[in-house]
Image: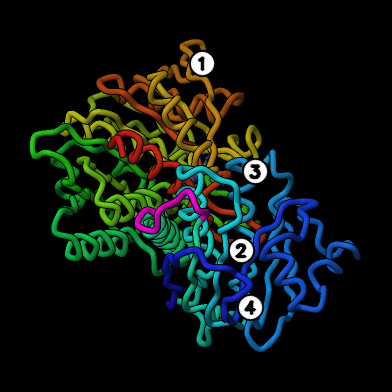
Amino acid sequence: MSQPSFTARKAANPAKLSTPCLVLPMFKGQKLEGYLAELDAQLAGAINRASKLGDFSGETGSSLALMGNDRVQRILLLGCGAEEDFDQSARKKLAQAAGKNLASTKAREAHIALDGLPLAAEDSAQLLETLATEILWACYVYSETLSQPKNMPTLAKASVSAPSALPIGQAKKALNSGVAIGEGVNFTRQLGNLPANICTPTYLAKQARALGRKHAKLTVKVLDEKKMRELGMGSLLSVGHGSDEPSQLIVMEYKGGKAKEAPYALVGKGITFDTGGISLKPGGKMDEMKFDMGGASSVFGTVQAAVNLDLPINLVGIVAAAENMPSGRATKPGDVVTSMSGQTIEILNTDAEGRLVLCDALTYVERYKPKEVVDIATLTGAIIVSLGHEASGIFANDDDLADALLAAGQRSQDRGWRMPIWQEYQKQLDSRFADMQNIGAGTAGSVTAACFLARFTEKYKWAHLDVAGTSFLSAPKGATGRPVPMLVEYLRARAGA
Ligand code: BES
Ligand code: MN
Ligand code: ZN
């Protein structure tokens, strides 16, 4: 897959540049003064006419491509909205519009002229970073299982001139960070989009080993079913029991901090296909259950980004990978299993399998004495009822950790929203035949799922992200790469960078 490269250029009068595509952000109602007036004159008043005729409003996220002249072949106008509302959300929409247009232009090179934007250094850096991330996002094309790739973008190089408050060295750094995050996001999307006959638990283990070979500070080990049996992971193993694909517990250790420093931990649900098991799902849209490893793929993407950003922290990424299938060996409703923690679980619904793999991975992570643990899972359809596709559900046993994730989501515009895990909900999990059952009584499905996990995470600070609504979409069908931007931002804040 080809992706564009980025360079930061010193500010120069955009009206004097030569480029196949000049990208120009403009506020709503912005007067054509300075270089904008010069450019407009060179284009025989085309910019002025575009706003007079109403084709370019300057509204947040709007865009208009104009053909230029021999020197500036195309001009891409991007709306920034009202100048006083140019906040994180507007800047993200600007970056997304840039990505969308640059992915479809036939230009091989583009220059993005941000010189005129009234932004302080920090906001400028953030804009450059998001621009790189969003352009990479838009230029990602899934082609793995197509005999002929479709809609390949032609853009190979993008240069950016930053707002004047941002020194060029920092502009370069911001673009590099944006690339690291964009590559992490696209890695996550690629793993999600791959069909489940390719992306099996074994395939995920191979990806982890390959990542480990590439980076000196990353160590990877994989626990097979035999090892998991020795550790007593009866809950995790019960999920893959009906499948011919062996389950895998993948452990990635990144050492960017001091040798003895406690790590942060990410734990991902990696159900490479969720049929529901004996509690079989209905057929419609069942193909989308190949995305049921969206939590796991976000661990991969975040670990890769952390490594490439060289974050000065220690980080453990754990993926609980299994395939949930019905068969003569599959777990049946009413079966009771013993988890690694010693707690027994009555499996009343084999389709509530995510919590069954996570609980053992969450017990396993105790051995790292982690500073904080965040699990990420496409855990419940109910979270889509609550939050739709806008926000990931955040559940936490620690307010400071919940706040850190909320803030990280706000800064990266990959937002979450906090949900309760109050004691009152716990009684829905009472069982006559085991210490707990794996489903609630029918209401607050996302909350009872989180309450189940809470019983395995009492020994450390823990948050759970339910990303069933955010990690993939049905239309256009595909993995989104969320919540990698939120997680990277969270880790970066924890690293104090
Ligand atoms: N993987 C699903 C949750 C899901 C649903 C993810 C839709 C993405 C889109 C999960 O394993 C599941 O089946 N959950 C059940 C739980 C129920 C049986 C308690 C659900 O949400 O219906
Ligand atoms: Mn399920
Ligand atoms: Zn599932």
Q: Earlier in the sequence, mark 2 or mark 1?
A: 2
Read off the magenta span: 163-170
| Residue in the image at 60% along x and 35% along y | 382
Q: Is residue 329 visible?
A: no
Q: Is residue 87 left or right of residue 123?
A: right
What x and y, as percent, mark residue 33?
73, 59
Please state which of the two labelled residues, at mark 2 or mark 1, is closer to the viewer. 2
Report the side of 318 relative to 226 (left or right): right
Q: Which residue is mark 3?
A: 86
Q: 449 above or below 16?
A: above
Q: Nearer the viewer, residue 35 or 79?
A: 35
Q: Is residue 167 magenta?
A: yes
Q: Which mark is residue 98?
A: 2
Label annotation for residue 273? none
Q: State the CA–CA distance, disc 3 to disc 4.
A: 26 Å
Q: Nearer the viewer, mark 3 or mark 4?
A: 3
Q: Residues within 10 Å of mark 3 (few under 14, many from 20)?
A: some
Query: Circle 1 is placed at which residue position?
Result: 425
Q: Please tell me whether the stretch drawn in magenta is mainly helix, strand or loop.
A: loop
Crowdedness near tag 2: few (<14), some (14–19) or many (≥20) residues, C-alpha within 10 Å:
many
Labels 3 & 1 near each other (Cβ < 8 A): no
